């Protein structure tokens, strides 16, 4: 396998590689800083290195340095609680921790050796070049959210990173000329693998906002950025701001590619953004364990309205499987669904070189995650259109509702509810029902808390758009929905009863 970062030696030395606020590194400066740190990691005989993953230049340099040294990096969420952090450190057993100078680390690190990351442009260059490790060598150990127990460390090999990034380059025509802007956290595959390692593998540039804001998006897109990555919460804020911000609309309209991921983007927000900017948001689909699985393919916009671009993004879908990805839907008994009709719900299972190797120290969990013939059980439920487009309808554990003999995905009901003018946020779950098996429950954050839409109005609204059996039987009102750092709704945190 070729180097993960051919741009470190192949890109023009003075080309900007990374920019965080007012601080930046060219490719020559990144190569010097990361190379010198890689020498230090190698000299320490490190087996794994933890990275205190703040949204800074230091985090990006630290991860690149670990990868140059052939040592797996363990990105740590700085917001992790003491118990969770302690579990991750004990489980991954890093040799040392990389951090920004001045960062105060929690007591959970104990006496673990600390190395401050030096990103000065004058940092000494590397004294030696490590040979490229084998493709199966672990590159990252990324811990899952731990919704059903302690977080599990997904071991992501180098070939999975290379495969995913090259497949996205093919699908999105991603080149060294692209400049990516985003404000995503760097302890997760979206912000770190796609948002930092992606541009560096292409030899392009990334500008990190530090903290997401529509003003920063406008500024960077107006200053030559060509791509924007975000999560649905960010795009929702953009959609809300667009009516009163023509400069934002113009900036988004000039972007080559707008990409959303980590959770489903509501159809209503898709439509508002397209109406205001003329640009469709591309949704892609992936997981920590699989990296990227699906996306629409990007083609240059055609000025002729009668011409439909091949692979045009469709609101509510995540496109088609990426090159090299095998994807199937299966019934509850594991039987493959062979007829794609856009209605039959099944669990997504996948195979391909983009998959993780194992859960660290968890052979039981690893074995349970795969079928006997090597398909990874994603736990995500979807339908597939006759032309292959995939539409996610929710998680098997929390979003598949069996009501009155029907299998119903929560996602499509949530999208329908969000089309109601009186609904700001919506989540849908199921709860036991003596007659139906499960009844559909809608959790609503009203647009006007003083005058929320009533339950019958919302039920009729959904029944008119979908089908009567998909209408909510119970409506509960909240001030806000619980979400994690990536903007995903945490349904297990919703109040009971």
Image (cartoon, rainbow, N blue to C red):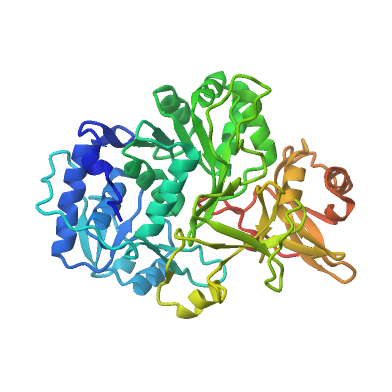
- Residue at x-position 65% and y-position 59%: 491
Which is more toward the observer, 208 or 392?
392
Q: Position of residue 441 (x, y in %)?
A: 78, 57
Which residue shows up at 50% across the image and 23% down it?
254
Q: Position of residue 356 (x, y in %)?
A: 44, 64
In the image, taking residue 129 as reference, residue 376 lies left or right, namely right
Residue 459's x, y, as percent? 86, 48
Q: Is residue 240 left or right of residue 230?
A: right
Q: Quadrant of residue 402?
A: bottom right
Left of 322 or right of it: where is 453? right
Q: Quadrant of the N terminus?
A: bottom left
Work out which quarter of the rendered image holds the C terminus and state it.
bottom right
Residue 196, compared with residue 49, is above or below; it is above
Residue at 89% over, 51% down: 468
Total labels: the figure holds 0
Front-lying residue, 376 or 396:
376
As rendered, which of 57 and 343 lies closer to the eye? 343
Decide which of 44, 84 is in the foreground and name it: 44
Residue 77 visible in the displayed image: no
Give me the residue at 45% from left, 47% from top: 167
């Amino acid at each position: 396998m070729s180097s993960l970062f051919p741009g470190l030696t192949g890109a023009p030395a003075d080309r900007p590689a990374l920019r965080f606020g007012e601080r930046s590194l060219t490719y020559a400066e990144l190569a010097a800083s990361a190379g010198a740190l890689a020498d230090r990691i190698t000299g320490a005989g490190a087996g794994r290195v933890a990275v205190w993953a703040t949204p800074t230049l230091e985090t990006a340099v630290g991860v690149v340095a670990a990868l140059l040294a052939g040592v797996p990096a363990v990105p740590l969420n700085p917001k992790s609680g003491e118990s969770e952090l302690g579990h991750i450190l004990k489980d991954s057993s890093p040799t040392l921790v990389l951090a920004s100078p001045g960062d105060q680390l929690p007591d959970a690190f104990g006496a673990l050796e600390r190395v401050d990351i030096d990103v000065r442009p004058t940092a000494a260059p590397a004294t030696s070049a490590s040979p490229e490790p084998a493709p199966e060598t672990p590159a990252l150990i990324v811990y899952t959210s731990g919704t059903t127990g302690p977080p599990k460390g997904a071991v992501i090999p180098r070939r999975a990173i290379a495969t995913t990034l090259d497949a996205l380059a093919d699908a999105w025509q991603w080149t060294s000329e692209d400049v990516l802007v985003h404000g995503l956290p760097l302890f997760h595959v979206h912000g770190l693998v796609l948002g930092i390692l992606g541009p560096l593998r292409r030899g392009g540039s990334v500008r990190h906002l530090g903290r997401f804001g529509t003003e920063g998006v406008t500024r960077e897109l107006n200053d030559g950025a060509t791509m924007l990555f975000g999560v649905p919460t960010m795009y929702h804020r953009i959609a809300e701001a667009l009516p009163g911000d023509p400069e934002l609309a113009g900036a988004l309209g000039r972007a080559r590619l707008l990409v959303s991921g980590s959770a489903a983007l509501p159809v209503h927000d898709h439509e508002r953004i397209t109406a205001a900017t003329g640009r469709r948001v591309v949704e892609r689909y992936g997981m920590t364990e699989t990296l990227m699985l699906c996306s629409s393919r990007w083609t240059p916009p055609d000025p002729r309205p009668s011409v439909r671009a091949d692979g045009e993004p469709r609101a509510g879908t995540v496109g088609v499987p990426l090159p090299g990805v095998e994807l199937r839907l299966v019934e509850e008994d594991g039987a493959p669904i062979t007829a794609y009709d856009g209605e039959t719900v099944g669990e997504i299972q996948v195979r391909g070189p983009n998959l993780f190797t194992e859960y660290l120290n968890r052979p039981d969990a690893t074995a349970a995650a795969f079928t006997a013939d090597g398909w990874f059980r994603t736990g995500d439920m979807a339908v597939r259109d006759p032309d292959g487009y995939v539409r996610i309808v929710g998680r098997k554990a929390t979003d598949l509702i069996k009501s009155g003999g029907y299998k119903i995905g929560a996602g499509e009901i949530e999208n329908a509810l969000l089309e109601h003018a009186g609904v700001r946020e919506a989540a849908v779950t199921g709860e036991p029902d003596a007659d139906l098996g499960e009844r559909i429950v809608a959790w609503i954050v009203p647009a006007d808390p003083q005058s929320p839409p009533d339950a019958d109005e919302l039920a009729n609204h959904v029944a008119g758009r979908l089908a009567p059996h998909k209408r909510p039987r119970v409506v509960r009102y909240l001030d806000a929905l619980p979400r994690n750092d990536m903007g995903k709704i945490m349904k297990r945190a919703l109040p009971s009863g």
